[in-house]
Image (cartoon, rainbow, N blue to C red):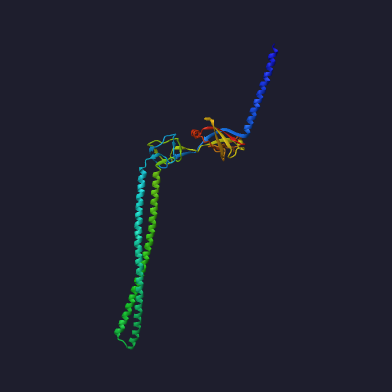
Amino acid sequence: MTTKPEKKKNKVLPIVLAILVVAGAAFGISEYMYASKHVDTDDAQIDGDISPVVARVGGYVKDINFEENTKVSQDQVLVTLDDRDYKIKLEQAEAGQVGANAGVGVTQAQIVATSANTSTAKANIEAAKSNVQAANVKLNLAQKDFNRYANLIKDGAITQQAFDQAKANKESAEAAKAAAQAAYEAAQDQYTAAVKQVGTTQSQLGVSNSGVSQRQSDVDFAKLQLSYTAIKAPATGIVSKKNVQKGQLVQPGQSLFAIVNENSLFVTANFKETQLEKIKVGSKVKITVDAYEDQPIDGEVYNFAPITGAKGSLLPPDNATGNFVKVVQRVPVKIKIQSKDKELLEKLRPGMSVKVSVSVN
């Protein structure tokens, strides 16, 4: 009576062991087949482009037009600074520009006047030149008469009075020529001076135009500074890290808040260096977010970091001291998210932990 149950128990145990062996073998084979076609890691997280917003000019905060953790649009005015000081600077710059333009107008009028003087001086030169030519003709005639009368006076053919008159005419012609020549030279000097004056005035115009350009630059700069009092969103996204309050005095370069750019999310997966051999750009990826494990996301390997995570840390390990311990390093790999589920994508946040599985077949 006692031997039969023992035989029954002996038959059950091998069956259970056989089932366990088969199940273990099936599990091992399935895991081997999966591992041969996939590379997995849970050292991964969601990343995204985060745009810090800083004040470009100083001033007191007048208005804040957003709430933290809300969506904003690109170029939306989020913070307004008190702009009265910058408006006064713009008015001063515009007043300086008006004065510079007036100076250019005066200089241009002077150029017109000096140009007219130059034309007049040139006409005087022509007139003086004609007078010199006429004086030369008269002098030649008077010189000939004097020479002829000088020969006749020797023979007593003319009276002394006639000879004296010829001599006086010659000397008068010589004086007239000298006067005409002096007037011609004076007209040339006046023309030269007028030309120089035109050149000087044109140089002054160049200086005045430079002043106008400088004043225009001052106006443009003042307008630019004034525009910076309206702080706009650099991209469409969600505002985070708000660090500004109404009435606060902000300084140029001060960080006010950050914006997580819309449609800029990706995954950074830190694979072991021994796993990289089979991973290539373009490899398909399955992404599982820890917070939403029942909603896997498709992805694709985009690129590889140029250095390991340890090498890019604030205090990278230094093995040059001789105390070398070999540790498997991890290399960050960027993975693009290709999901079209907008509702799920809106739930994702940079920093969330994920698991990734790269298909290497």
Counting from the top left corner in percent of width and height, residue 32 is at 64, 31
Can the viewer see residue 162? yes
Nearest the viewer among 125 and 40 is 40
Nearest the viewer among 293 and 272 is 293
* Relative to 265, residue 117 above or below: below
Which residue is at 38% across, 63% downward? 196
* Relative to 125, residue 204 above or below: above
Q: Residue 128 occupies which quadrant of the picture?
A: bottom left
Q: Residue 176 occupies which quadrant of the picture?
A: bottom left
Q: Residue 335 occupies which quadrant of the picture?
A: top right
Counting from the top left corner in percent of width and height, residue 202 is at 38, 60
Counting from the top left corner in percent of width and height, residue 104 is at 36, 56
Indicate left or right for 273 with 176 as reference.
Answer: right
Nearest the viewer among 174 and 27 is 27
Can the viewer see residue 333? no
Counting from the top left corner in percent of width and height, residue 203 is at 39, 59
| Extreme-top residue of the structure | 1
Q: How many marks?
A: 0
Quadrant where the C terminus sits is top right
Which residue is at 35% across, 73% downward? 130
Nearest the viewer among 242 and 21 is 21
Indicate left or right for 302 with 120 as reference.
Answer: right
| Extreme-left residue of the structure | 161
Quadrant where the N terminus sits is top right
